[in-house]
Image (spheres, helix red, strand yellow):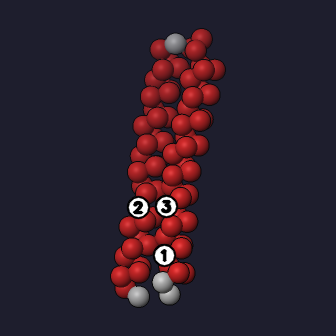
Amino acid sequence: MGLIAIGAAIAVLVGLGAGIGIGIATSKAVEGIARQPEASGKIQTSLLLGCALAEATAIYGLIVSILIIFMFK
């Protein structure tokens, strides 16, 4: 059971990368809006799409970790 828990923990670490990626993207979007306020609509749209994709990656990692726990029980 110990190796299963380690495998699930490694699968959940995907969320760490997604969180860092969303933070970097948000900081760059705010920086871009500060430099060009007239482009805020396009920047915001791109930011939301990128954040959604990064968050989907984190959710996939969570699903994989849950599957590992329950399939190899």
Q: Quadrant of residue 5?
A: bottom left
Q: Which mark is residue 13?
A: 2
**Marks 3 and 2 close (CB-CB < 8 Å):** yes
Q: Position of residue 38 (x, y in %)?
A: 60, 11
Q: Is residue 12 left or right of residue 63?
A: left
Amino acid carrying label 3: it is: Gly
Q: Position of residue 31 (x, y in %)?
A: 46, 23
Q: Residue at x 55, y 43 (%)?
A: 53
Give the crowd class for mark 2: few <14, some 14-19, many >=20 residues within 10 Å: some
- Secondary structure at numbered mark 2: loop
Q: Is residue 52 above or below residue 12?
A: above
Q: Position of residue 73 (x, y in %)?
A: 50, 87
Q: Which mark is residue 3?
A: none
Residue that badge 3 annotates: 61
Q: Residue at x 48, y 20 (%)?
A: 32
Give the crowd class for mark 1: few <14, some 14-19, many >=20 residues within 10 Å: some
Amino acid carrying label 2: it is: Leu
Q: Which mark is residue 68?
A: 1
Q: Position of residue 55 (x, y in %)?
A: 55, 49
Camera-side residue of 64 and 50: 64
**Marks 1 and 3 close (CB-CB < 8 Å):** no
**Marks 2 and 1 close (CB-CB < 8 Å):** no
Amino acid carrying label 1: it is: Ile
Q: Is residue 48 above or below residue 41?
A: below
Camera-side residue of 71 and 59: 71
